[in-house]
């Protein structure tokens, strides 16, 4: 009995000693909360997690996907980018609820482009949203932007959202279509740790 307890303790200690790079990074699949369309089929979030767990998938989300009720998912980055080019060439949205600036994407804390906001200009990014204060107190940051984005108003080139800081794509990424107002909370609410606006 004591040997079994000791072995269990040593196993737990070894797991704790593993470097962060040796542990599996969270993926976009793990964070998915709404349906996805991949390989000609639409799957619920639970089915996607069961079928594609551990795989690096790439997602594209915009008004087109919201309208059909499922985010588009792809096995390769190139396929996701090709789909985005083919299906999201559109003029700036006329029904935007906020002022439009084609040179930047604005990310919002709440659904429907409401709440606090943070912006990134074209050809720039925010490598670690945890470094940016969303709610300021006099002497400290009450809350950072890490895992806070629920909707976005994109500029001319859209935006990429990553589960991990520093634009780490080891778990895949989600592309938000250009010139669009997108409700991320239906699929990837409060999971982005970094963003890139091409």
Image (cartoon, rainbow, N blue to C red):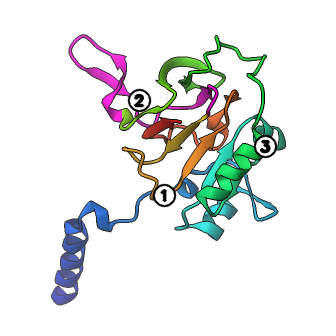
- CA neighbours of label 1 inside 10 A, class few (<14), some (14 to 19), many (20+): many
Q: Secondary structure at mark 2?
A: loop
Q: Nearer the viewer, residue 188 or 120?
A: 120
The image quarter containing residue 141 is top left
The Cα atoms of the two marked residues, 1 and 3, are separated by 24 Å
Q: Residue at x 47, y 37 (%)?
A: 195
- Bounds of the magenta segment: 130-157
Callout 1 secondary element: loop
Q: Which residue is mark 2?
A: 145
Query: Is residue 160 found inside the magenta-colored segment of the image?
Result: no
Position of 130 compared to 71: left or right?
A: left
Per the model, the C-alpha gap separating discs 2 and 3 is 30 Å
**At which x and y percent is residue 180?**
70, 28
Rendering coords of residue 55 (x, y %): 55, 67
Question: For mark 3, what is the residue?
Answer: 87
Residue at 69% from the left image edge and 63% from the top image edge: 47
Q: Nearer the viewer, mark 1 or mark 3?
A: 3
Q: Residues within 10 Å of mark 2 (few under 14, many from 20)?
A: many
Residue at 64% x, 10% y: name it.
Answer: 99
Location of residue 86 in the rendering, given as x and y in whole percent from the top left corner: 77, 46
Residue 171, numbered label: 1
Q: Nearer the viewer's eye, disc 2 or disc 3?
A: 3
């Amino acid at each position: 009995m004591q040997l079994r307890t000791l072995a269990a303790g040593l196993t737990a200690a070894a797991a704790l000693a593993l470097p962060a790079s040796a542990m599996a990074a969270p993926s976009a699949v793990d964070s998915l909360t709404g349906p996805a369309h991949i390989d000609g089929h639409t799957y619920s979030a639970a089915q996607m997690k069961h079928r594609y767990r551990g795989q690096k998938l790439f997602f594209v989300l915009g008004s087109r996907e919201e309208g059909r009720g499922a985010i588009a998912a792809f096995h390769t980055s190139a396929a996701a980018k090709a789909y985005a080019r083919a299906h999201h060439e559109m003029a700036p949205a006329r029904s935007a609820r906020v002022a439009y600036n084609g040179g930047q994407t604005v990310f919002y804390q709440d659904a429907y482009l409401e709440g606090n906001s943070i912006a990134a200009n074209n050809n720039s990014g925010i490598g670690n949203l945890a470094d940016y204060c969303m709610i300021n107190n006099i002497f400290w940051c009450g809350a950072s932007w890490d895992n806070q984005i629920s909707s976005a108003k994109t500029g001319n080139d859209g935006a990429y959202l990553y589960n991990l800081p520093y634009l780490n794509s080891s778990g895949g990424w989600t592309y938000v279509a250009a010139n669009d107002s997108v409700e991320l909370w239906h699929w990837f609410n409060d999971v982005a740790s970094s963003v890139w606006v091409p």
